[in-house]
Amino acid sequence: MGFEGETWYVRGAAPVAVGTGGDAESGLDPRHGGGGADIGEILIDEADFPWLSGRFRAGPAFGAVEDLFARELALAEGDDAAHRSRWEAIQAEIERTVRLISPDGPVAAFLLHIRGDRAWFRWSDAPFDDEGDEGDEGAGGAGG
């Protein structure tokens, strides 16, 4: 699908105030989340639809969300209902806290895992349905 070699960006969801790094004068491209904190970059080296994975290079703001991603993975590995509801809460917090930005701009929905220097995710150009199930339709997005 042509994703290998692309760089995707993980940025903070909160925009930076004008004049502090999120404006045109800063030299940051808003398509790449210039308005949010630099959490990291993912250099895609494997595409196994609907999942993309690659080398994760942490940015200066990663420390603020590192524990969130560690808790998400620990809960994702559980298989009982209690784990599922706690995982959904952590996933919702991730969605509120970070944005995933493709080479073409921010994506509408994503499921992102980060462990050490690896990240893997699936994404969609449209929001996932109300039950939080990303489903197959639209997952992986149409871009690329």
Image (cartoon, helix red, strand yellow):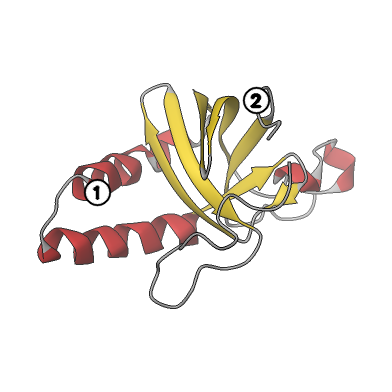
Name the residue at 78% across, 47% down: 31
Q: Mark 2 sits on what residue?
A: 4
Q: Tell me which amino acid carries mark 1.
A: Ala
* Disc number lying in front (2 or 1): 2
The front one of 112 and 131 is: 131
Name the residue at 52% across, 25% down: 54
Q: Mark 1 sits on what residue?
A: 76
For the C terminus, give its image quadrant. top right
Q: Position of residue 73 (x, y in %)?
A: 27, 42
Element on which disc 1 rests = helix
100 sits to left or right of 77: right
Question: Residue pushed farthest right?
Answer: 25
Nearer the N terminus, badge 2 or badge 1?
Answer: 2
Q: Is residue 113 above or below residue 99?
A: above
Determine the image quadrant of residue 17. Answer: bottom right
Q: Tell me which amino acid carries mark 2.
A: Glu
Any part of residue 21 in sight: no
- Please rate how many residues cluster around mark 1, counting C-alpha atoms within 10 Å: few if below 14, some from 14 to 19, many from 20: some
- Please rate how many residues cluster around mark 2, counting C-alpha atoms within 10 Å: few if below 14, some from 14 to 19, many from 20: some
Determine the image quadrant of residue 86. Answer: bottom left
63 sits to left or right of 110: left
Q: Position of residue 51 (x, y in %)?
A: 49, 40
The front one of 125 and 30 is: 125
The front one of 100 and 129 is: 129
Q: Position of residue 58 (x, y in %)?
A: 50, 27
Any part of residue 47 in sight: yes
Q: Is residue 59 above or below residue 111?
A: above
18 sits to left or right of 140: right
Element on which disc 2 rests = loop
Q: Is residue 39 above or below residue 35?
A: above
Q: Which mark is residue 44?
A: none
